[in-house]
Amino acid sequence: MQISLTTKHIDLFKLSLFQRILLTTDGTLTEILEAYLLEKVQLVKLSEELVIITKSISALDLDIGTQVIKRKILLQGQISLKNFIYAESIIVPERLDNRLKSRLIESQEPMGRLWLEHKLEIFKEIIDSAIETAEDLSDYFNIAREDKMLSRTYRVFSNRKPIIMITEKFPKSYFIKEH
């Protein structure tokens, strides 16, 4: 069950400074994590598939029958091999440059690095933040299924069109101690 930040169920004062930054920044998460952790972060693709949507997605201005790429990844420490972030993305391939689209599918690079590599002008808009139970994600983080996860969902725009919607999640027990 998700509880939106807009309904004030997440008490921001009970979160660490870094947890608040992760939930509210519109910066590139990979570089922010690397600065905090003092460790390079790598992408681990869990799944990536081309699908035809059966429900419209208003946040991306998409109708039923549109083809999208659904992608699930982990951001993991290169040395520790610890998973820090789980992310799900819905990507609108018809709105992407062909070179970026092929790099996105073929590479193991986080999206933020690809945006920089391709000098893509983007705008991000956070549309939701939530707290929920870990459930099936618990195995990735070595936590209990009933442990809490914090998340944020945002849209990425390019050329004034929404091109990607991303939901990033991390255990509430992470990033509590200040470095």
Image (cartoon, rainbow, N blue to C red):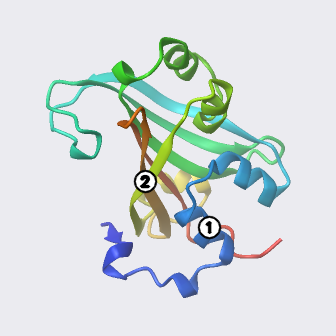
Residue 75 image position (x, y, % from top left): 64, 44
Mark 1: which secondary structure?
A: helix
Residue drawn at point x = 41 percent, y = 59 percent = 135
Query: Considering depth in this image, is 92 or 148 the residue closer to the camera?
Result: 92
Mark 2: which secondary structure?
A: strand
- How crowded is the residue under tag 2: few (<14 C-alpha within 10 Å), some, or many (20+)? some
Identify residue for label 2: 125
Image mark for residue 171: none
- How crowded is the residue under tag 1: few (<14 C-alpha within 10 Å), some, or many (20+)? some
Say above or below: 97 vs 16: above
Q: Quadrant of the N terminus?
A: bottom left
Q: Quadrant of the C terminus?
A: bottom right
Residue 167 image position (x, y, % from top left): 44, 50
Left or right of 81 in this view: 153: left
Tell which tag, 2 or 1, sits nearer the viewer: 2
Mark 2 vs mark 1, CA separation in Å: 15 Å
Image mark for residue 21: 1
Write down the quadrant of residue 42 in the picture. Answer: top right
Q: Which of disc 1 and disc 2 is earlier in sequence?
A: 1
Left or right of 48 in this view: 3: left
